[in-house]
Image (cartoon, grey):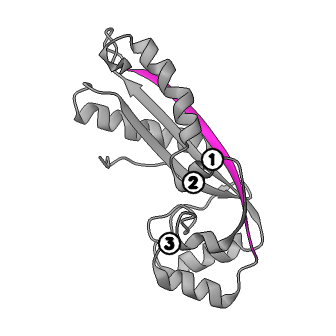
Amino acid sequence: MIPDVDELTVGEPEHAVVENARRKARAVLEQIGGRDPVLAADTEVVLDGRILGKASDEGEARERLESLSGRTHAVLSGLVVLAAAETGEPIERAGVARSEVTFRKLSSRLLDAYVASGEWRDRAGAYAVQGLGSTLVERVDGDLSNVIGLPVNLLFELVPGLLDAAGDSHSQ
């Protein structure tokens, strides 16, 4: 489900990604009536302490990619897992995954080709490392699944504790 929530786009990046994931999770939990556990994530590319966000057009995509060219940036993912509890108030587990991504120096030709591919659309930082965007990347330090958008290692840290705390049929 894709909930319609207002997302933070400025401020302290680690706080923003967790709060955005929390807003998404709570909206979905409300939509489904609190019956099942909910997982929500928010991933952002951060350069020089600033959230880059998603590009709205080809010009913005090119600007973002040019700013990342030859540099290292952070990819932060906030993850929130909610489960219904017998007390009525949902139990929440939340965390942040951080990976460092270093882009190679991008030529105009590579930038033109990548922007023309359209893969940048609806992507944090205007690239997708799991696709053609892998040609932009020199190195990833940290969890690659985080850069793709779902930090699997963090998810495995959060879910068992949440399900144990809920203490009901969600433990499967």
Query: Helix, strand or loop at disc 3?
Result: loop
Residue 33 belongs to the span the image colors magenta: no
Number of dots carrying numbers = 3
Nearest the viewer among 1 and 144 is: 144
- Amino acid found under the numbered disc labelled 1: Pro
Quarter holding the C terminus? top left
- The residue that disc 3 covers is 120
- Amino acid found under the numbered disc labelled 2: Glu
Q: Picture coordinates of residue 22 (x, y %)?
A: 45, 36
- Amino acid found under the numbered disc labelled 3: Trp
Q: Which residues are magenta?
A: 90-104
Q: Picture coordinates of residue 45 (x, y %)?
A: 61, 57
Q: Say if mark 3 contacts mark 1, CB within 8 Å.
A: no
Residue depicted at x 32% and y 49%: 2
Locate residue 126 relative to residue 104 in the image: left or right: left
Nearest the viewer among 53 and 157 is: 157
Locate residue 113 relative to residue 121 in the image: left or right: right
| Camera-nearest label, 2 or 1 | 2
- The residue that disc 2 covers is 44
The image quarter in which residue 126 lies: bottom right
Residue depicted at x 58% and y 64%: 129
Of label 2 and label 1, which has the lower sequence position? 1
Residue 94 belongs to the span the image colors magenta: yes
Residue depicted at x 55% and y 43%: 151
Predominant secondary structure, magenta span? strand
Q: CA distance from mark 2 to mark 1?
A: 8 Å
Of label 3 and label 2, which has the lower sequence position? 2
- The residue that disc 1 covers is 13
Query: Helix, strand or loop at disc 2?
Result: strand
